[in-house]
């Protein structure tokens, strides 16, 4: 039997905090005097906080000092956290808990691999933190997706060869990172957008219970 493990992205896969990122970034854009739309927010999916600020400033054609950048990163995160502290397990995306239950039943270990520096807090708020074998987040890595670093550390945490790791992602950068790591990539969301993934599902509810059999019965 082949031993396999799973690495989950957080936002857009387990929970949806993109709406809170959007509101927090919009507050900052409003303060700087330009419009920031939900379409703009799509550009920040799976991207580190520092890079997200750079993209936001490019959208507004605003140039600021390094000191101001650091201050705005801090204020954006504080605005975002106000929303996060109101989260509960009602915000777990449909199919997520059932999928974790399936993995537990099959004795397939899983970790989180997320760009978010607030991943432990979010998992705690939705009462899932104790279910993951490890959390690799924005505090654990030096390079953001599409660099595969976060997933390669995930493989080490699972004590598995990267080729035996299955990654669930909703962002183009995340799918690219998984593919570059030599892992099995599963795109969750728009199938055309995530066409580079090895497998595609609209959401976690679409994944059949026997999906993992092809990997553990080889």
Image (cartoon, rainbow, N blue to C red):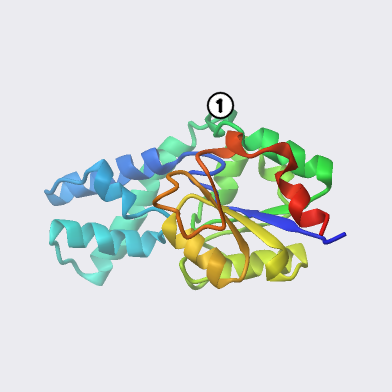
- In the picture of the structure, the residue carrying the numbered disc 1 is 90
Residue drawn at 36 percent across, 64 percent down: 50
Q: Nearer the viewer, residue 162 or 190?
A: 190
Q: Quadrant of residue 66?
A: bottom left
Which secondary structure, mark 1? helix
Q: Nearer the viewer, residue 77 or 2?
A: 2
Q: What is the number of callouts on the image?
A: 1
**Disc 1: CA contacts within 10 A as few (<14), some (14-19) or many (>=20):** few
On the picture, is 37 further left or further right than 167?
left
On the picture, is 19 further left or further right than 86?
left
Q: Which quarter of the figure is the C terminus placed in?
A: bottom right
Residue drawn at 72 percent across, 64 percent down: 164
Determine whether 139 is above or below 186 in the image. below
Determine whether 32 is above or below 54 in the image. above
On the picture, is 101 further left or further right than 139?
right
Where is residue 101 shown, x and y percent of the image?
75, 37
Determine whether 167 is above or below 103 in the image. below
Q: Which quarter of the figure is the N terminus placed in?
A: bottom right
Residue drawn at 43 percent across, 58 percent down: 172
Where is residue 119 shown, x and y percent of the image?
55, 50
Where is residue 24 shown, x and y percent of the image?
32, 44
Q: Quadrant of residue 156?
A: bottom right
Residue drawn at 35 percent across, 54 percent down: 44
């Amino acid at each position: 039997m082949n031993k396999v493990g799973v690495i989950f992205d957080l936002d857009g896969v387990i929970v949806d905090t993109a709406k809170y990122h959007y509101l927090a970034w919009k507050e900052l854009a409003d303060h700087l005097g330009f419009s920031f739309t939900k379409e703009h927010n799509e550009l920040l999916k799976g991207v580190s906080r520092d890079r997200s600020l750079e993209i936001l400033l490019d959208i507004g054609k605003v140039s600021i000092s390094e000191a101001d950048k650091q201050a705005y990163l801090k204020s954006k995160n504080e605005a975002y956290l106000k929303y996060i502290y109101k989260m509960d397990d009602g915000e777990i995306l449909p199919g997520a808990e059932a999928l974790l239950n399936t993995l537990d039943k099959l004795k397939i270990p899983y970790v989180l691999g997320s760009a978010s520096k607030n991943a432990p807090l979010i998992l705690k708020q939705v009462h899932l933190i104790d279910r993951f074998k490890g959390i690799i987040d924005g505090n654990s890595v030096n390079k953001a997706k599409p660099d595969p670093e976060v997933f390669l550390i995930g493989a080490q945490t699972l004590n598995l060869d990267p080729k035996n790791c299955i990654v669930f992602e909703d962002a183009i950068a995340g799918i690219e990172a998984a593919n570059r790591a030599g892992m099995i990539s599963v795109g969750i969301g728009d199938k055309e957008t995530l066409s580079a993934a090895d497998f595609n599902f609209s959401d976690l509810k679409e994944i059949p219970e026997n999906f993992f059999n092809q990997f553990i019965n080889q």
